[in-house]
Image: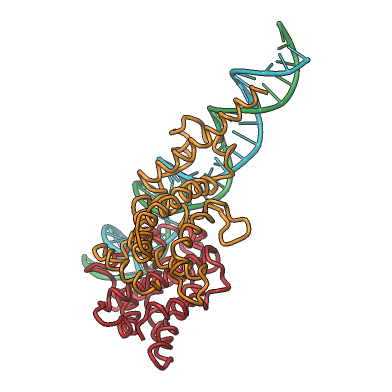
Chain colours: A red, B orange, C cyan, D green
DNA sequence: CTCGCTTGTCTAGCGGTGCTAGGATCGGAT
DNA sequence: ATCCGATCCTAGCACCGCTAGACAAGCGAG
């Protein structure tokens, strides 16, 4: 059975290589540059190999999204924990979110802008995505205010952050006032 | 000169036809179905004709976006004006925004999700886009609160609406609680 | 050790995309 | 009536996601 195990290990390694390469390429040159041909060339295999690991390009995007979700969850927790006091915690969380979106645009797009064929807000939502939402909920649930469902509050806060992230990156919002917008958002939405 | 004028009229008419057809096709079958071939077939001309009106597909998307921006501005004003009192006005505005995004997904995507090659938040932002923002500002500027710049407040509110619209449509938020989210948003963000 | 077979990989190609070069055609001006 | 310029179309480029079928490498059986 050792032979089979070795092969499975190699296969798993190659799958990770594909996802990592796709992500790298997307971060470097944008998702429109991530084509199956280029991806295949970079991992030094032919195109069909990609399809023995993933159903298609969508699934590769989805894999990058899941990868990024775990990372984002960690980044959010790291940001929020470092702060003391609920207000600073929420502000730090918001900043961490926007920083992640700004510094990992390709991953952020894979998670929320592109179609990665992932289920959301449903029974079979993948664990990393639920965990990223949970990371938001941990901090934001504390400042939802009386009589307001923590989940609902988190959804609204998240939507606001998502809007800021995407509109800013698309050049729809002047980039200079980012910090003031965060403060306004936290001041108004959170019950401290 | 009458001949030339007639030709210009016909050209302008055909350009409108292209934009209207692209929009129609996008609303019916999604933007991924809007290809230059299909579009050309629908307007009963060959592909190269499209390129005598627009530099490429991006510009066609941009034209649809501008079209939609005027419409959205009108919809927002119609919604907000009908209400009495600032709170009802803001709520109506938010609902009008989300309704527009829900019922005209293709146009909304052309404006904010896709790359239509348009300038935003800059000097040479096209008039319809500035006007749509102005429509938001008219109502939201009244509830920004003391010491808060109306433009900045409008940007934040807009971002929140945009986040709700996109996340909801992408299946990232449970569709049932939309109304409760709007109320929470208005309650917290607006100073009434 | 050799043979047959499974498993894995590649070459080649399909139908589609956005976009464009170059030739044909048509209509107004002379 | 003829010329000429504007207008439009046919045909094709390079690229896309994806797949069928040929081929080779490595395994287990005899």
Above or below, A28 relative to B48: below
Image spot of residue A158 (x, y percent): 37, 73
Quarter of the image for residue B168 reads bottom left
Above or below, C19 relative to A29: above
Above or below, B136 relative to A148: above
Quadrant of the image containing the C terminus of chain A: bottom left
Residue A18 visible in the snapshot? no
Image spot of residue D23 (x, y percent): 42, 54
Quarter of the image for residue B42 reads top left
Quarter of the image for residue A80 reads bottom left
Q: Nearer the viewer, residue B152 or B63?
A: B152
Q: Is residue D5 left or right of residue B112?
A: right
Image spot of residue B16 (x, y percent): 50, 37
Question: What number of labels is visible?
Answer: 0
Q: Nearer the viewer, residue A18 or A66?
A: A66
Q: Residue at (36%, 54%) from the top-left corner?
A: B82
Q: Is residue A75 left or right of residue A143?
A: right
Above or below, A5 relative to A58: below
Furthest residue to the bottom? A84
Image spot of residue B67 (x, y percent): 48, 46
Q: Residue at (50%, 48%) from the top-left corner?
A: B61
Q: Residue at (38%, 72%) from the top-left corner?
A: B192
Residue B58 visible in the snapshot? yes
Q: Is residue A50 left or right of residue B127?
A: left
Quadrant of the image containing the N terminus of chain A: bottom left
């Amino acid at each position: 059975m050792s032979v089979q195990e070795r092969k499975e290990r190699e296969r798993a390694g190659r799958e990770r290589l594909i996802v990592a390469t796709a992500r790298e390429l997307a971060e470097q040159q944008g998702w429109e540059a991530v084509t199956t041909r280029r991806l295949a060339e970079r991992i030094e295999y032919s195109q069909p190999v990609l399809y023995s690991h993933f159903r298609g390009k969508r699934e590769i995007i989805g894999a990058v999204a899941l990868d990024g979700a775990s990372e984002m969850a960690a980044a959010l927790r790291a940001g929020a924990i470092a702060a003391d006091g609920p207000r600073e915690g929420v502000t730090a969380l918001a900043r961490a979110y926007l920083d992640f979106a700004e510094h990992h645009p390709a991953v952020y797009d894979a998670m929320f802008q592109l179609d990665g064929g992932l289920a959301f807000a449903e029974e079979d939502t993948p664990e990393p995505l639920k965990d990223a939402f949970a990371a938001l909920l941990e901090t934001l649930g504390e400042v939802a205010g009386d009589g307001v469902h923590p989940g609902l509050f988190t959804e609204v806060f998240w939507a606001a952050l998502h809007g800021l992230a995407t509109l800013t990156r698309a050049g729809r919002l002047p980039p200079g006032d980012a910090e003031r917008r965060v403060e306004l958002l936290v001041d108004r939405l959170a019950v401290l």
